[in-house]
């Protein structure tokens, strides 16, 4: 390693802006911010090459706290703004920070289209299953029956599953992680950074004020092992305190089975994040507590050309074939005549 | 042939006229003519009209055109709703409008006759396809009796031609299906009109050859149809006279025909070259703006990237993202799309990024009249956002002027780090006129100054870069991601003066509101003053803006020729207004503001200058007739 690179290595502190962080004490966003700085510092990318673009929400304040280029835009539109930026500056590392309301409600359209285009964007969705900034209305990911100020008798709309949606839009990288599992969170962010194409990461994030504990089943030390399943590429789907439970496919349906009594590891579903066909990943994205353990990790990681690369290739091809255009030629592109 | 003037003979390599008439039909020299080709939307009238325009432009006439098509791609054939028309005004002198009244109307079916006859002058030439006047066709158009037989057309010079039959005969040898044969009948009609106005067939023959090079039978059929129409005029002596419109005396140089949408695309591309910035044009298809996207999508060789976004909000978002990244971000749409973009335009105002937003206005509200023109988005452009949210607004005044104003929009956006809205309209977008092609070497450069990693910045983030520290004109720096040492955050929350940090301080907010407004006001120092055509003081000033220029200027010229003390001024910069606007207004006893809306500029002018301006307002989805403005001027003078 040259001295140059060593000098250029950032520390997480280098990535902290001078702005006071203003999330509520105990908010899960703090951890995501800390792990983001950790993950990015190790990438060897100079600080000026990072751009954070967010929408509106507690989570979307994120860019203010990073000493990188940042854009706190308007509600739901960050993927669109990031798309324009990336189209003209494909060399930059562009991160979209969004919330469950921002990304899935008002900005749902932009999200799916950014994903289907496979723009080289890292989209991190802070899912707290609530509208934090507007003080606690239910969100598109709130579980049925969630009681909030705007749903006093319990919410009645079926929640969206962010990862199912992303997979439906043909996302090339789809992952889920937890705010409190800091190592997993850091590693997931690093993997997202390494992916070429849209990387969509859902982070279960605790809103201390309006939805405290919604993810306790997945984070509490005493219950966690039975309620989450850490995905590992090429490994069977095993979970449980005693690693004695697994997921088996019964027809087209997943089922929880106990190992032993004639059921062996070989009978379990084996995770394949590289599978061309996203159906198994989709099936995993539909597994929801309490009927199933919820999967944590990389659901899908496949390669597909990015939109900006294909666009730039089209441009390079015409340039190679016909050369750069001159205005003289452009102006005269229709039939012309001379008046003396 | 003695009747052909030099400009038409020069290129007729193939003699289009096999028969020498027994005695040459006299040709009458006229200064100008207005014709309209009307038929079912499947009849190819737009194409025939475009060809006539093109030929006339090549002959050296000044031209102005007005296509008029239904919103439905294919309304039921033969119905009034399905009528499509194309109007061309061509002249041997300088003209500015597609013409008020028609000298010649071609009606390919009864529906076209019914919807267009009212615009034909008394005694005008009416060419009809008599084959299309069967009882079923008449019924669809709502005629109780056949107008070709009931005497109701007595006031016109009617040329009833069995176009369908003659055209089928002309292409009979080619053994096409009836359907295919009938698709050429627009060219038969075109040929006949070419004869009537002594046009050369050559440009259209050339076009047919290149267009159908892969389909020889279609090429041959259209060629035969065109010639057959021409020959029909010549051999049957269809009219006792035919007409010549000579070359116009227009400034020398190389010309091409251009529509407003084409000119916008070229203007944006030229501006991006002159600024040395890549152009990202992001748009969601909408009539009448889509052609800008189509045009620019072809221009990848010129540093142009296009994005067909998922909706209008994404389109403006992408333009803003590109602007943040140091490129030229442009989005284009029509009124309904502007509604969707409003919040994001506010973001561009707050973040002070240079984006250009094109609104090709159409009839509203809501979906309104998608294919018709209107000027009713001015107040939306001025005020249609939350908060005190000023943007710069410009408006081209003619199809060719769209080039210049697109260039200006870019210059002002970059020069003042502000969104600029450009208000075109359906009339400018689809209308065409000759364009004196500029010399690219003489186009001005658009200076771009990106903030550089400044002396204090040491790459550790300790040196403060201030994204909202302004120059004397109140313009903030453009600091582009990727530049070491200038890392900063922008956003839609109120900015603290200078540092750009989030601030909820009341005094700061007021200061920033004033600063943003003052910055836009400062643009007035860098745009041209309002110029006046006609007396520098007098009875009436006719003040217009945008696409109504042609009718207004023509009306004022006529009024002046009558010796009336009428002056005319046209606003192409609407926010800020030219710095001398108030002073100009005060020099006239009365100010008349014709607009294709309910009086939106008038509201602004009255508010800004306390001038009791009078309005002439029309909202029919159509441009002004010159005569309408003339009549209003006369009324004002008499009152
Ligand atoms: C156009 C618009 N509509 C509504 C709002 C109000 N608003 C701000 S944030 C928000 C919801 C945020 O929820 P989420 O995206 O889940 O973010 P969180 O605060 O939970 O992190 C809403 C409705 C807004 N800012 N803009
Ligand atoms: S309201 Fe909830 S999400 Fe927002 S900062 Fe507070 S704890 Fe975090
Ligand atoms: Mg939320």
Image: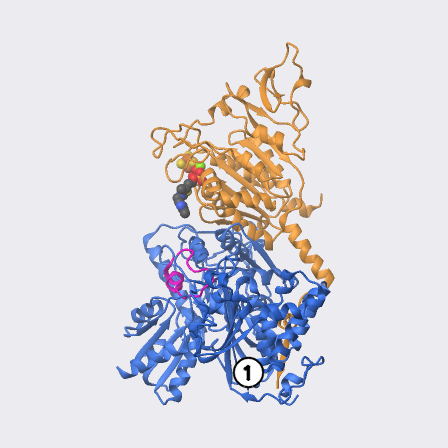
Q: Nearer the viewer, residue A57 or B238?
A: B238
Whether residue A54 sits left or right of residue B51 in the image: it is left
In the figure, the shade used to draw chain A is orange
Q: Residue at label 1?
A: B239
Camera-side residue of B366 and B492: B366
Quadrant placement of the N terminus of chain A = top right
Q: Which residues are magenta?
A: B366-384
- In the rendered image, residue B382 lying in the magenta stretch gets the answer yes
Prevailing secondary structure of the magenta residues? loop
Q: Is residue A7 magenta?
A: no
- Report the chain shown in blue: B
**Horizontal and vertical percent for residue A224?**
52, 21
Q: Position of residue A335 (x, y in %)?
A: 64, 74
User: Left or right of B503: which side holds B234?
Assistant: right
Residue A316 screen position, x and y as percent: 70, 57
Direction from residue A115 to residue B378 in the image, left or right: left
Residue B240 point in image, percent of width and height? 55, 85
> Which residue shows up at 48% across the image and 67% down it?
B110
Q: Quadrant of residue A328?
A: bottom right
- Residue in view at x 53 percent, y 68 percent: B108
Q: Is residue B263 above or below residue B124?
A: above
Please report, as a chain letter, where disc 1 is located: B
Query: Mark 1 packing: few (<14 Cα in 10 Å), some, or many (20+)?
Result: some
């Amino acid at each position: 390693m040259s001295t140059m690179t060593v000098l250029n290595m950032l520390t997480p502190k280098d990535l902290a802006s001078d702005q006071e962080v203003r999330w509520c004490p105990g908010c899960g966003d703090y951890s995501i911010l800390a792990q983001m700085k950790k993950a990015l510092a190790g990438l060897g990318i100079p600080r000026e090459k990072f751009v954070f673009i967010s929408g509106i929400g507690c989570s979307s304040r994120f860019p203010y706290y990073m000493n990188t280029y940042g854009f706190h835009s308007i509600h739901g539109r960050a993927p669109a703004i990031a798309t324009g930026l990336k189209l003209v500056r494909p060399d930059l590392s562009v991160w979209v920070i969004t919330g469950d309301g921002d990304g899935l409600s008002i900005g749902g359209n932009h999200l799916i289209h950014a994903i289907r285009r496979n723009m080289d964007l890292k989209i991190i969705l802070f899912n707290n299953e609530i509208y934090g900034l507007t003080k606690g209305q239910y969100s598109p990911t709130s579980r049925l029956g969630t009681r909030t100020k705007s749903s006093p008798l319990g919410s009645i709309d079926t929640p969206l599953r962010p990862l199912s949606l992303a997979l439906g839009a043909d996302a090339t990288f789809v992952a889920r992680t937890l705010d409190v599992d800091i190592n997993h969170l850091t590693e997931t962010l690093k993997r997202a950074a390494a992916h070429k194409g849209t990387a969509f990461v859902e982070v279960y994030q605790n809103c201390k004020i309006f939805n405290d504990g919604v993810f306790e089943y997945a984070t509490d030390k005493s219950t966690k092992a039975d309620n989450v399943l850490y995905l590992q590429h090429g490994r069977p789907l095993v979970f449980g305190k005693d690693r004695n439970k697994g997921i088996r496919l019964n027809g087209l349906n997943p089922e929880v089975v106990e190992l032993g009594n004639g059921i062996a590891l070989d009978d379990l579903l084996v995770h394949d994040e590289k599978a061309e066909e996203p159906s198994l990943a989709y099936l995993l994205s539909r597994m929801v507590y309490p009927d199933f353990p919820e999967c944590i990790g990389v659901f899908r990681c496949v390669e597909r050309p990015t939109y900006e690369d294909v666009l730039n290739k089209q441009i390079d091809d015409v340039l190679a074939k016909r050369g750069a255009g001159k205005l003289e030629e452009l102006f005269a592109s229709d039939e012309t005549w001379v008046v003396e | 042939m003695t009747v052909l003037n030099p400009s038409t003979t020069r290129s007729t390599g193939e003699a289009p006229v096999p028969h020498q008439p027994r005695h040459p039909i006299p040709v009458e020299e006229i200064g100008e003519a207005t014709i309209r080709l009307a038929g079912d939307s499947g009849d190819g009238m737009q194409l025939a009209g475009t060809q006539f325009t093109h030929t006339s432009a090549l002959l050296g006439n000044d031209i102005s055109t007005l296509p008029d098509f239904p919103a439905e791609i294919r309304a039921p054939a033969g119905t009034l709703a399905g009528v499509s028309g194309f109007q061309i005004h061509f002249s041997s002198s300088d003209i500015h409008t597609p013409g008020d009244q028609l000298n010649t109307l071609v009606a390919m079916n009864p529906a076209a006759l019914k919807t267009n006859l009212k615009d034909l002058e008394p005694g005008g030439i009416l060419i009809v396809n008599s084959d299309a006047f069967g009882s079923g066709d008449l019924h669809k158009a709502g005629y109780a009796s056949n107008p070709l037989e009931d005497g109701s057309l007595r006031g016109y010079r009617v040329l009833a031609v069995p176009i369908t039959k003659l055209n089928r005969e002309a292409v009979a040898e080619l053994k096409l299906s009836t359907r295919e044969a009938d698709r050429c009948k627009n060219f038969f009609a075109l040929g006949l009109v070419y004869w009537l106005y002594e046009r050369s067939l050559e440009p259209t023959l050339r076009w047919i050859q290149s267009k159908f090079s892969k389909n020889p039978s279609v090429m041959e059929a259209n060629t035969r149809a065109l010639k057959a129409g021409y020959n029909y005029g010549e051999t049957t002596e269809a009219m006792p006279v035919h007409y010549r419109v000579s070359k116009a005396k227009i400034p020398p140089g190389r010309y091409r025909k251009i529509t407003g949408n084409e000119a916008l695309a070229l203007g944006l591309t030229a501006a991006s070259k002159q600024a040395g910035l890549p152009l990202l044009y992001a748009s969601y298809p909408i009539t009448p703006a889509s052609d800008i996207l189509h045009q620019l999508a072809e221009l990848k060789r010129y540093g142009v990237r296009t994005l067909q976004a998922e909706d209008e909000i994404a389109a403006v978002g992408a333009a803003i993202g590109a602007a943040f990244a140091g490129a030229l971000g442009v989005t284009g749409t029509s009124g309904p799309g502007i509604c969707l973009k409003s919040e994001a335009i506010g973001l561009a105002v707050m973040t002070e990024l240079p984006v250009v937003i094109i609104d090709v206005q159409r009839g509203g509200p809501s979906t309104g009249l998608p294919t018709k023109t209107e000027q009713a988005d001015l107040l939306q452009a001025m005020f249609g956002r939350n908060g005190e949210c000023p943007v710069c607004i410009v408006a081209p005044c003619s199809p060719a002027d769209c080039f210049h104003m697109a260039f200006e929009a870019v210059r002002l956006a970059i020069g003042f780090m502000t969104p600029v809205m450009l208000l075109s309209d359906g009339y400018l977008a689809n209308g065409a006129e000759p364009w004196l092609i500029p010399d690219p070497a003489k186009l001005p450069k658009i200076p771009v100054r990106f903030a550089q990693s400044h002396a204090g910045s040491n790459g550790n983030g300790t040196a403060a870069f201030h994204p909202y520290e302004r120059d004397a004109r109140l313009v903030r720096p453009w600091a582009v991601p990727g530049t070491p040492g200038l890392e900063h955050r922008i956003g839609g929350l109120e900015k603290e003066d200078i540092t750009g940090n989030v601030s909820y301080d009341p005094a700061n907010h007021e200061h920033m509101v004033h600063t943003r407004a003052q910055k836009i006001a400062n643009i007035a120092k860098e745009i041209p003053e309002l110029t006046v055509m006609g007396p520098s003081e007098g009875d009436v000033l006719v003040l217009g803006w945008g696409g109504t220029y042609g009718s207004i200027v023509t009306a004022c010229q006529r009024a002046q020729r009558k010796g009336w003390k009428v002056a005319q001024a046209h606003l192409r910069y609407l926010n800020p207004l030219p710095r001398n606007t108030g002073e100009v207004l005060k020099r006239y006893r009365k100010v008349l503001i014709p607009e294709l809306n309910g009086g939106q500029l008038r509201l602004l002018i009255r508010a800004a200058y306390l001038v009791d301006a009078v309005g002439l307002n029309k909202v029919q989805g159509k441009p002004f007739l010159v005569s309408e403005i003339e009549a209003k001027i006369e009324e004002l003078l008499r009152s």
